[in-house]
Image (cartoon, grey):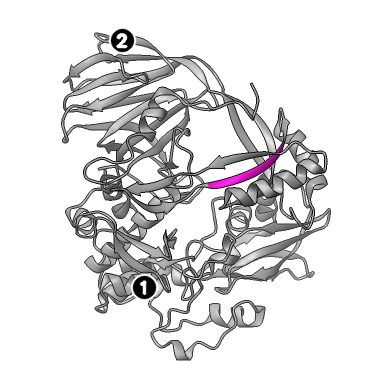
Amino acid sequence: MNLATTANKSDSIEAASQRTLQNGAQPVVRVGLMSGYDQVDFRVHGPFSVVSLAGDTLFGKIKTDRRWRCKIDDSEAATFVYSIILGTFSLEDNAKRLADKLEKEGLEPLVIPQGRELIMNGRSIHDGKMWRVVVGEFENEEDALSEVDAFTTPETPAPRIFRHRIEDATGVLELYDAEYDRNAMINNGFRLVPETDSTEVTIYDIRVGAGFHWERVEDRSYKGAIEIRIGHEGDMLILNEIVLDEYLKGVVPSEMHFTYPFEALKAQAVAARSYTLSRWCKVLPSEPVDFPATVAFQVYSGTTHSKEKTNQAVDETSGEVLVVGNSILEAYFAANSGGHTESKEFWNPPADTALVGIPLLVDNDKFTYDLTREVDVEKWIMEYPESYSNPRGTGIEMLDRNARYFRWEVTVSRRDLEKTIKRKLGFDIGTLIDLQPLRRGVSGRIIELEILGSHRNYILHGELNIRRVLSETTLASSCFIVEPVMGDLGALLEVSFLGAGFGHGVGMDQTAAGVMAYKGSKYKKILTTFYQGAKIEKIWQ
């Protein structure tokens, strides 16, 4: 098999790609709940059936309160080839034009489609189809990386690696209940299909918040179908297939506390719906998961934290999305901007006119800083301007608590920081000498930072990477200044990070949205403040 001829789709994924419209005109999404496990325990509340990935009923219309277990009996990881992406295009003709040019230069390029189009009631709502131009078929990522520099030209300035699956993972799962009354050895995977709308599945010991200070293990419950299958790496993959608004009812209370003002919750529902659909269109239907349930995408906790108020916010805005031109906006949001949102251009190119950085002072005429300049960032962080991002005094406990992120400070010893950097980077920089910001975005968030060490210097790229490398968990944001604490002999003893905000800062500031709603703003006004030039459209009833 090779990159040009392979088109692998398992039965369940093929079926899912045809189930994009249910319950009126709402798409069905497939959310990755867990991966990297070799066994999982669960309990089903209500009648259900166990169905193979091919659609055959293994156990029909079961009703039991017993705990079940599934574990891997045997598995083999998927087979991949690695190629180098030389360009990604929204028009197939442009991709073919580059491919033709490369072919004349003696290469063997391929044009690979990605993404999909969202069509509702015969109308194209959002076209996420793109075309990648790739070259090479390498057995491993290291071989592909060794050739990347050779393809860096003015016409292809940023080649990167693309992993393509040519053989699906395979394996056998053992499924049984607590009394071993029902047991089966099942090839590749199965689905727990609810027999009623009220049926829920509780999955035990899900890892939550990996890499962040709130990391923990939690039991979570879900509606919709649960699929347990062999994942790409030969491990266990658990996903939830569910109608979009039901998915959002598990997202909104996880992303914004239910005690926030109702108009803020409605703004969150519309932003989350827009973000979900925009990203959904970028995923190939042949992939088993559309997106994860973690902070890397949107936190999704099923029905575990479901609240009537957040459910109502989803229902009252059902079908509403943010639109720019003829496309649904990829409506990013973050917990707290620190008083100024970030531009998507610096955080995740290319630029987007609806995702520009804006100050969030109660009186923006008083904002006079250029936060790309170090001197202005220092002044900005050291003051507490009257800002919607500073919620102190609203009287809403969970909103007021976010004042701790408006301005924050973390101090770490030099030796501990050196150990963290070594562990995160995989090499020793020696004695830490300094941390120097090289480039900041419009919110003051550092995009490039140089670590100066006695053995070597190293430049970190990307706000999230910077936050992770400089912390045992993750720094609240990359909008920070560094205050060194020196010893009597002039040696660096400690480093204090003084910062503003929590998260990447792009799009809607969730704290500021809460304060704006508290002060009387309606959800549409909140949304158009953060997503400049976007319109709100209802794409289903």
Q: CA distance from mark 1 to mark 2?
A: 54 Å
Residue 482 sits above or below residue 59 on the image: below
Q: Residue at x 71, y 27 (%)?
A: 139
> 29 or 494: which is nearer to us?
29
Residue 451 sits above or below residue 185 on the image: below
Q: Is residue 161 magenta?
A: no
Which disc, if any, is residue 183?
Answer: 2
The amino acid beneath tag 1 is: Thr
Residue 302's spot in the image, x, y percent?
29, 42
The residues colored magenta run 130-135
Q: Residue at x 18, y 23 (%)?
A: 65
Local crowd at mark 1 within 10 Å, few (<14), some, or many (≥20)?
some
Left or right: 149 in relation to 461: right
Residue 362 sits in quarter: bottom left
Residue 429 visible, this orientation: yes
Residue 125 sits in quarter: bottom left
Label 1 secondary element: helix
Residue 482 sits in quarter: bottom right
> 529 or 476: which is nearer to us?
529
> 318 or 21: which is nearer to us?
21
Q: Residue at x 57, y 59 (%)?
A: 348
The amino acid beneath tag 2 is: Asn
Residue 116's spot in the image, x, y percent?
45, 44
Which disc, if any, is residue 528?
Answer: 1
